[in-house]
Amino acid sequence: MKLRSFFSVLVASVLVLLLVGASGFYWLTARSPLALLRGGSTDGPAAAMFVPKQAPAVVSLLVNPERLEAFRQVIAAPGARRQSRAEVEQLKQSLLANTGLDYKQDVEPWLGDEITLALTSPDVDRDAQTGQQPGYLLAIATQNPERSREFLQLFWQKRVAAGTKLMFEQYKGVKLISSQPEPAVDPQKPETKRKKNKQQEPDAVLTAEPATTLATAVVGDRFVLFANQPKVLRDAINNVQAAELGLGSSPAYQQALQSFKQRQIGLVFLNLPQLAVWSGQGSAADPSTKATNLYESIAIGLGLSRKGLLAETAFLAAPGQTLPAATPALSKPTGALAYIPASSPVVAAGTDLEQFWTQVSDGISGYETLAQLINQPLNNLRNAWQLDLPQDIFSWVKGEYAVALLPRPEQQPDWVFVTERTEAATTAIANLDTLAKDKGFSVGPLTLADRPVSAWTKLGSTPLKAASKTTTEDNSALLANVIAAEVEGVHATVGNYEIFATSVAAMEQALQATKNSLVDSPGFKAAIAALPKDNDGYLYLDWANSRSILEQQLPFLRLVELASQPFWNQLRSLTVTSLGGESGVRRSEVFLNLSATDKA
């Protein structure tokens, strides 16, 4: 063989080997569970074509659940993998409870890369006389149309065997199957006896709520649909045939998808005015309600990291509202966090509290329940300090700030508030002391951790001013007198910061926090590591230590936990940060640190 030919063959062989190697590497990385770190396989939910444009809520999983399980097994600590696998198996079985079906045998073979659940309408028939009848739609992608049809056939066979009567309908080329509804009996009125003659219809039964049913359909070779009423399926088919009716044609929805930086494994899209109608706090026919809403919709894109879940959030302005572009104000955690103890389970920190509160209050003004949820902690502090916090404190906090909750065994938790001192702050703090005196409090000095502290008290048997004349050696007696005088709040100047606390004990912890502060704790560092460094501050929850407190303040949280118990058991912390945003959109990110991935 000539040398030239030899090199030609050699080069060709090398190229083939490189091509095969590159293809193999691509196949391995694409099939690897770790590929989910780059997001799902699609840019958005294909099932959005079934969902109406004004749907109140849409939640989509954009990867096959088996890939998520594999990912969790890869990154979990070896000792946690068996428990993780058991929790997933328990969840799978619970999904098909009381159906007589098996997830692994009947669902897993055909399940595709998308599951979308939508609240399609607050009231399907829009008839006030029949009561509110929300529409629910579940769209599941299939990778094996034949097996998915077999699943539906088996599903309905078991329902018929249990006594369910079926109804069949052919609608625009799609076969709809639904169960015949049983009228719901009004619990306040006795059920009318049915006639014994089987050929006659039973007497009318008064109903308190409209009857619901279950309906299914297979659309082409791509999706299996479930709905709580046949009309929901008919509307879904109409949305496919008239694209302008579907969610995909919504400008807000398209803007939300484009705002995400990378592909997501899941997506949540909320239409806030419609969601308010569904929750009974608004009316679709009332334009004045919509006019007060700053935001029209919220989109949440879910992604994965080795330590947990990342959520990109986009708040989109309502028509007629203005959201100017904004850049993050911070490039590192605020210095105020140096005075927050590492044991604090709930912390909020940032800069310019007045501006932040204005944005929050404007955003929630149209939603009563959400406003109550946000305002409740402020009302608790207002009752404790007898202060209008937005007016008396938030209005002058232009620099850095940090607010923290400190738990106390078998008592109401304490609060610590740290703010950067500015010229306006100095004047405002002096005015707070004057305001406290005007409201009947005594303002006097004491010493904690070798620092002078001002205390607001209700006078007890021993006046604070008399006790304050004691010597340094009698400081313990002074503290006893102060405590007996019912301390309502204390504040102290430390460097360039002013620290406020609801008790002497909380102030002591804050003054000593520099030895073990939150900002230097491993837990907080892990909680913010996956978030952008340029931001507007953090809201941090140490879930293990704040769980019981939050459950007391937010009773509905227990119901949320029951719906996904394994997840909440794995959660270590939750951190939210605001990132500013472009015109018309406010951006933020949420990181959920999961204990199962802590050692990975």
Image (cartoon, rainbow, N blue to C red):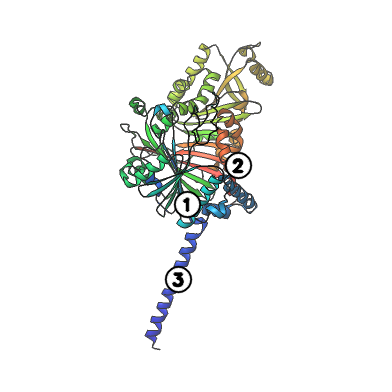
C-alpha span from label 2 to label 1? 23 Å
Instruction: Give amino acid for label 2.
Output: Asn
Rendered image quadrant of residue 470: top right
Residue at (45, 71) in percent of width and height = 20
Q: With respect to residue 569, does 558 lie above or below?
A: above
Number of numbered discs present? 3
Three-letter code for the amino acid on which mark 3 is drawn: Val
Q: CA distance from mark 1 to mark 3?
A: 27 Å
Q: Are marks 3 and 2 in contact (CB under 8 Å)?
A: no
The quadrant in which residue 489 appears is: top right
Q: Nearer the viewer, residue 4 or 314?
A: 314
Q: Position of residue 556 (x, y in %)?
A: 55, 31
Residue drawn at (58%, 31%) of the image: 551
Report helix, strand or loop for mark 3: helix
Q: Badge 3 is on which residue?
A: 20
Residue 141 can be seen, yes or no: yes
Q: Earlier in the sequence, mark 2 or mark 1?
A: 1
Which residue is labeled 2 in the image? 569
Q: Residues within 10 Å of mark 2 (few under 14, many from 20)?
A: some
Asked if residue 225 is positioned above or below residue 445 in the image, the reply reads below
Q: Of circles 1 and 3, which is in front? A: 1
- Give the residue pinned by disc 1: 63
Q: Earlier in the sequence, mark 3 or mark 2?
A: 3
